[in-house]
Amino acid sequence: MRSDPLEHEQDDTQAARPTPPNGFRFSSTDAGLAKGARLDLWLAVADDAYPAAAVFTTNRVVASPVAMSREHLRLTGGRVRAILVNAGCANACTGQGGDEDAATCARWVAELVQCDPREVLVFSTGVIGKRLNMPAIERSLPGLYESLAATPDALEHASRAILTTDLVPKVSSRRIPLRDGAFGSMVGLAKGSGMIHPQMATMLGFVFTDLMLGDSTAIALRSAVQQSFHRIDVDGDTSTNDSVLAWSSGRRSEKPLDFDDTAHAGLVALTDISIDLAKRIARDGEGATRLIEVRVRGAASDHDADLCARAIATSMLVRTAVHGNDPNWGRIVAAVGRSGADLDTRRLRVGIGDACLFEDDTPHPDREPTAAAALRLDPVVLWAELGRGACESVYYTCDLSADYVRINANYRS
Amino acid sequence: MRSDPLEHEQDDTQAARPTPPNGFRFSSTDAGLAKGARLDLWLAVADDAYPAAAVFTTNRVVASPVAMSREHLRLTGGRVRAILVNAGCANACTGQGGDEDAATCARWVAELVQCDPREVLVFSTGVIGKRLNMPAIERSLPGLYESLAATPDALEHASRAILTTDLVPKVSSRRIPLRDGAFGSMVGLAKGSGMIHPQMATMLGFVFTDLMLGDSTAIALRSAVQQSFHRIDVDGDTSTNDSVLAWSSGRRSEKPLDFDDTAHAGLVALTDISIDLAKRIARDGEGATRLIEVRVRGAASDHDADLCARAIATSMLVRTAVHGNDPNWGRIVAAVGRSGADLDTRRLRVGIGDACLFEDDTPHPDREPTAAAALRLDPVVLWAELGRGACESVYYTCDLSADYVRINANYRS
C-alpha cells in the first residue's frame, strides 16, 4: 500500500515528460502581457464541459477574474469547458473596467470553443492596478486555439506561461494503475513565489485528471488544499488572485488497482500532487535557497499544532537563521512560546534534523554541530514537541535571504 | 493645552541632557557580559522602595529574570528599591540554574543596598540558552554601587548599557511645570531592534518619574503600553524577555499647572514618552533606514482598525516596497484585504503621504510621483480608509532592507 502522503516523494521518472490527461489540450504563447520575451498566456480546453472545483483567495479584495470565475462555477454547478490564464497583469483593483475585461476574455474564448461563456474561467497573476492589454489578448486567441495539443511540450509551455518571479516551473504528476491494465493520469501545475501564506497566496494551481472525481471534487479539493497550499508560507501575504482548480474529464472510469473506487484514488492523488506542488512553491520562494519543513508534535489539538507550526514557519528570525546556517534553537523556542499553542515548558523539546537542542529545560550546545550539518540539507527539518497531547502539523517555508528584499524592493507586484 | 499625543513631537532642547528624576541614581559598567568593549550592566537604585508597575512579554516561554521580577512585584505589592539590567545574555531557556542566577543577582544587590531581595528586579537581554557570567557580575557590583549618581552622564550610560543590535540609544524625557514653580520630571529609556512585535518584543523599556503615579501606576502603564510598545513591529517576533517598567519616586506631589492632579499629568507624560520611545525603537529596527507610520481610518471597530493597521505594518511586501521607494499601493490594498477587517471595497481609499493612490475602485497612477516623494521622508506615512465607520488606529514599523537579513543570519540571539 501507499505510504503517508506527507512522506511521499514524487516519482521523477514518471514526471519527466508528462502529457495533459486524457480529455484536455493546452496551448501557450507570448502575447506581450508580461515583460520580456516569454510565454505569458495559456489556454486549456476540455473535450466537453467537465466537472471542476476551485478554491479562491480569502482576501477581501478579490481580482475581477476571481470574482467572475467563482460566479461562473456557481452558475454552471461546477462544469468547465476552457480556462484562460495570463501572467504579467493581475487585473485586480481595476474597477468595473476590469470586470468587463474578464467577461470579454471569457466571451472570446467561448466563441472560439463554441460553448457557453459561463463554462469559461479566467485566471490572472502579476501587477495589481493595471488593466489587461485586451487587443494583445484578442490578437493571440485564434492562434492559441489553433495550436491546442495534448503533448508534453504543450504541458511544459503552460507551466512556464504562468510564472512571475518564480525561477522554476512547478509540475507534479501521478499515474494510477487501473484494473483494466490502463493508467489513470493526474497532472498539476502551479506558480508561487511572493505573497505566499496559508489561506491562499499569489499562487495559482491547476490539477487535471482523467479519473472520475465526480460529486466529491469540491470536497476532495478543499481537503487537499488544506493539507498543502494552506501550509506554505513565503512572506505572510495573501493576494487578490489566489486560485487552485481541480478539473476532471472522468475518461478513466475503471477502478484503480489499489482502491475501491476512482474517487478515492483521485482524492489521494490530488492530495499528493497538491503537497508536492506546495513544497515546490515554498522551495522556489523569492530569494530562497532551500525548503524548510516545520514539524510540530505533541500538541493538545490540531489547532494548537497548526498555530505552533505556522508561528515557526513565519518567523523571519528563524528563517534568516536557517539562511545563515545558524542552529539558533532559541528563536524556535521564542516562536513556539508566542504561537498561542498550549505547551508544557518543562516537557518542550526543540530540534533541527536529528539533533534535539533543547529538552528537560536545558540547552544541549554539544549537539549544535549535528544541527549545523542538518541546516545544509534540503529540506531543512525544524521540529518542536509540545508535551501536551498527540496532535501534529507540518508547514513548509523557505529560508529568508537578502535576495528576497532585493527582489521585492524592485518588483512591482 | 497639549496636542494629541500621537502628533506630539519631543522637545529636543529639554531632552538634550536629561538627568535621572529626583529620587533615582544610576550606574553602568563594562562587566564583560556582551561582546566587545561596551557598557553592559546597569544598576538603578531608588532612595526608598517606590511604587512601580511592569508589563511583561506574552510569550509562553519566559526568561528567568522575567519570572522572578513578576513574582517580586506581586510579593511586594509593586514596591521597588533597585533594578539590575544586563545586555549580552537573556538568561532564557537556562532551566533551574537560570532561576537561581536571577535570584542570586537580586540577593547581591539587596545586600549592597540593604533592602529586601524582593524589592530588587532583574532584566536581561541578549542570547537565549546561555547562562549569566555570575563571577563577572559579582565582581562588578560593588563598583557599580559606589558609582551611583544622578547625573546626565549616568543616564546616558544607562541608555547605552541596555543596547544589543540597536544602533542608537533611545531616551525620551518630559518636564512638567508644577503650581509651585518647580518642575516634575519623567525620563524613559528603551532598547529594541529585533523580535519587535505587538504584545511586547525583545524590548526593554524603563520610565522613571518623580511625579506621583500612586495606585494608578499599573493602569497608567497598561494604557500607555497599549498605545505605544504594542503598536510597533520590526519582524513579528516577540521574545522571552520583553519588559516595560514604570517607577515613581513621587517626590513632586505639587499639582501640575495644566492638570487637576499629578496622576493624570503622569499618565499623559507616560503615554507621550512611551509613544516616543516606541517610534525610536521602530526607526532603529534592524537594517531600517526610516520609520513607517501606518494610519487606518474609517473602520467599523477599534479591533478592525488595529487588525488592518497591523496587517499593513507587518507586510514584508509593503516594507520592502518602502525600502525600494516604490509607491506600490497594490501591496497595501492586498494587506488591507487579508487583514480580516470589515471593509467596503468600493469606498476603500489607500494612499502614501498626501497622495491618494486608489479610490472609487480606481487607481490613480498620475499621483505616484507625489507618493514616491513621500516615500523618501522620515517618517513615511501609509494610510487606508475602510469606509465602514469612525474608528482608527496607528502602527509603527520600519522599512525592510537586505541588511535586516544580513544582521539576523549572522547574529546569535
Image (tube, coloured by chain):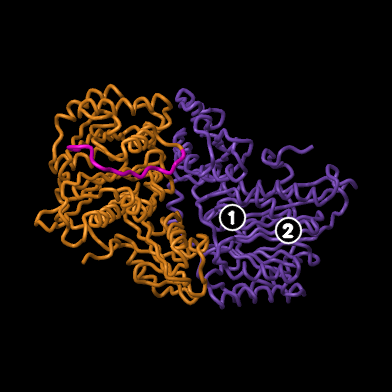
Chain colours: A orange, B purple
Magenta stretch holds residue A395:
no
The residue range painted magenta reads: A46-60
Residue A129 is drawn in which quadrant?
top left
Q: Main secondary structure of the magenta part?
A: strand
Where's residue B157, x and y in %? Answer: 66, 58
Crowding at dot 2, Cα within 10 Å, few <14 / some 14-19 / many 20+, comes out as many
Q: Residue at x 26, y 35 (%)?
A: A83
Mark 1, secondary structure of its residue = loop
Q: Amino acid at mark 2?
A: Ala
Residue to which mark 1 is pinned: B199
User: Pointer 2 indicates a residue of which chain?
Assistant: B
Q: Residue at x 28, y 43 (%)?
A: A52
Magenta stretch holds residue A49:
yes
Q: Amino acid at mark 1?
A: Gln
Mark 2, secondary structure of its residue = helix
Q: Residue at x 56, y 77 (%)?
A: B96
Where's residue B373, x and y in %? Answer: 51, 29
Vertical placement of A173 versus B42: above or below? above
Measured in 3D between alpha carbons, the distance from the residue under mark 1 to the one under mark 2, in whole angstroms, is 16 Å
Residue to which mark 2 is pinned: B218
